[in-house]
Amino acid sequence: MPSLVVRNLDETIINALKARAVEHHRSTEAEHRAILAEVLMRPQRKSFAEALLSIPSVGTDADFMRLNDDARVSNVFD
């Protein structure tokens, strides 16, 4: 199995990795492998455009028009 060497890590990162390994009851090396697998192997997130394209077409703009529009209110955010 290939190896990975990470050089020039900040001491705070190393300490955080060691603390996380203790929390999960595993070695620092095993924790490092778990973090890499968790981040790199998870499914890709949809882009905003892909999310919008996946929304089904459920009506026309007229279906969503406001019926009780109070014309006296000029700006609802004031």
Image: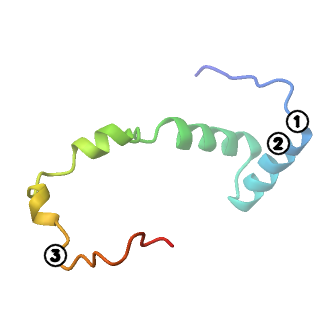
**The quadrant where residue 49 appears:** top left
Tally the numbered discs: 3
The answer to the question of whether label 3 and label 1 lie on touching residues, with beta carbons closer than 8 A, is no
Q: Would you identify the image quadrant in which residue 14 lies?
A: top right
Give SS at disc 2: helix
Name the residue type under label 3: Leu
Vertically, is 49 above or below 25? above
Instruction: Note whether 41 is above or below 56 in the view shown.
Output: above
Where residue 17 appears, as percent x and y from the top left, is 77, 47
Counting from the top left corner in percent of width and height, residue 63 is at 10, 64
Q: Is residue 43 left or right of residue 60?
A: right
Q: Which residue is mark 1?
A: 10
Residue 10 vs residue 61: left or right? right
Contact, mark 1 vs mark 2 (Cβ under 8 Å)? yes
Q: Nearer the viewer, residue 56 or 69?
A: 69
Q: Amino acid at mark 1?
A: Asp
Please tell me which residue lies in front, 47 or 13. 47
Is 74 displayed left or right of 59 in the figure? right
Mark-to-mark CA distance, 3 and 1: 60 Å
* Viewer-nearest of discs 3 and 1: 3
Please, what secondary structure does the residue beneath circle 3 have? loop
Q: Nearer the viewer, mark 3 or mark 2?
A: 3
Q: Amino acid at mark 2?
A: Ile
Labels 3 and 1: the sequence-earlier one: 1
Q: To which residue does mark 3 refer?
A: 67
Q: Dot 2: within a 10 Å radius of its alpha carbon, few (fewer than 14), some, or many (20 or more) residues?
A: few
Q: Nearer the viewer, residue 72 or 14?
A: 72
Q: Quadrant of the N terminus?
A: top right
Residue at 28 percent across and 75 percent down: it is 71
Q: Which residue is mark 2?
A: 13
